[in-house]
Image: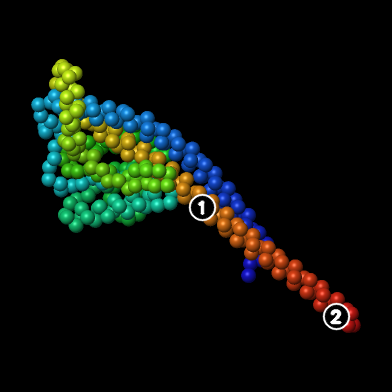
Amino acid sequence: MATVQELGRRVRAVTNTRKLTKAMELVASARLRRAQERIEAMRPFADRMLELMAGTARASASVRSLPLLQRREVRRVALVPVTGDRGLAGAFNAQVLRRTVALYRELQGRGIEVRWLPVGRKGISTLRFSRFELDSQWGGFSDNPSYSDAQAIAHRLTELYVEGEVDRVVVVYNAFVSALTQKVTLTDVLPISEEMLETDDEERERDRLAGDFIFEPEPEQILERLLPVYLETELYRALLESAASEQGARMTAMRNATKSAGELIENLTLARNRARQAEITQEILEVVAGADALTQS
């Protein structure tokens, strides 16, 4: 049975741990609010970008010749799992890697070659430990991704696709639903879907009423320049979603850890009080026994 001193040391250690987890919960909460604000600020830009591309595509004679829209038989796939740079976020990193590895095995079973391009130090270290060969890797910005980070990733993915080294690019990340919920999402970012450039009848009627537009240079050339920007925007959205999900997962994990530490402190304090009571009772018994011995003598 543990002594009063040992239980006291454990209570102090768990108390210090609870202070740390509480501080991490507060930090994650503040970062989560900032991440949500960045996502909300970015959404109008993404929507306008899509509208601009759709309008330009409608004015184009043909878009099938554009490199990022060309579809071909899938023989090589690039997998881009987006994880965090740090742990202590519950199952945030593990669920992305688990889903990506499951997709890898599925593709391998179909005889498709897979190339790994992970984002986030936790994913990089895990894949290296599992002996996977990494084509490219990015890390160090999971808490606060910038547009330039998305540009760097998009440039490499575009290079691989245009040169024919991969025929499909899949990004796996945690989409932010709420602070308590993160949904693992698989998104095909290349080739860019032609359906994305299609619009409904209402938008076509609005374009007709607005009159004809004169494009300079040609619509096909404008769209060719817009498609890489769209890819960068989609990757930036995934990075922001992942950043918000990571902070939400960390906040929830630290809150649960703080609660568990509190319960453990209560149990240890109760055990310490019982041990102290047992020691006092033992001392009283020894004093009484000593007094009886003196009386009898």
Q: Badge 1: few (under 14), some or many (20 or more) residues near its Cα, within 10 Å?
A: some
Question: Label 2 sits on what residue type?
Answer: Ala
Q: Is 48 placed left or right of 260 in the picture? A: left
Residue nearest the observer in this picture, 82 or 203: 203
Which residue occupies 9% across, 26% down?
61
Q: Report crowding for label 2: few under 14, some 14 to 19, many 20 or more residues within 10 A (C-alpha).
A: few
Location of mark 1 (residue):
257
Does 171 appear above or below 67? below
Q: Nearer the N terminus, badge 1 or badge 2?
A: 1
* Residue at left offset 25%, top offset 34%: 231
Residue 222 visible within the image: no
Q: Nearer the viewer, residue 21 or 152?
A: 21
Q: Residue 104: where, in percent of width, then height?
A: 25, 53
Q: Quadrant of the C terminus?
A: bottom right
Which secondary structure lies at badge 2? helix
Classify the position of the N terminus by image quarter: bottom right
Instruction: Estimate the x, y position of residue 230 in percent, counting from the top left.
Output: 25, 32
| Residue at the (27%, 55%) spot, across then down | 102
Quadrant hosting residue 198: top left
Asked if residue 284 lies left or right of residue 188, the reply is right
Identify the residue position indicated by label 2 in the image. Answer: 293
Compared with 128, 58 (above or below) is above
Residue 268 location (% of width, % of height): 61, 61
Q: In which image quadrant can residue 6 be found?
A: bottom right
Q: Secondary structure at mark 1?
A: helix
Q: Residue furthest left?
A: 61
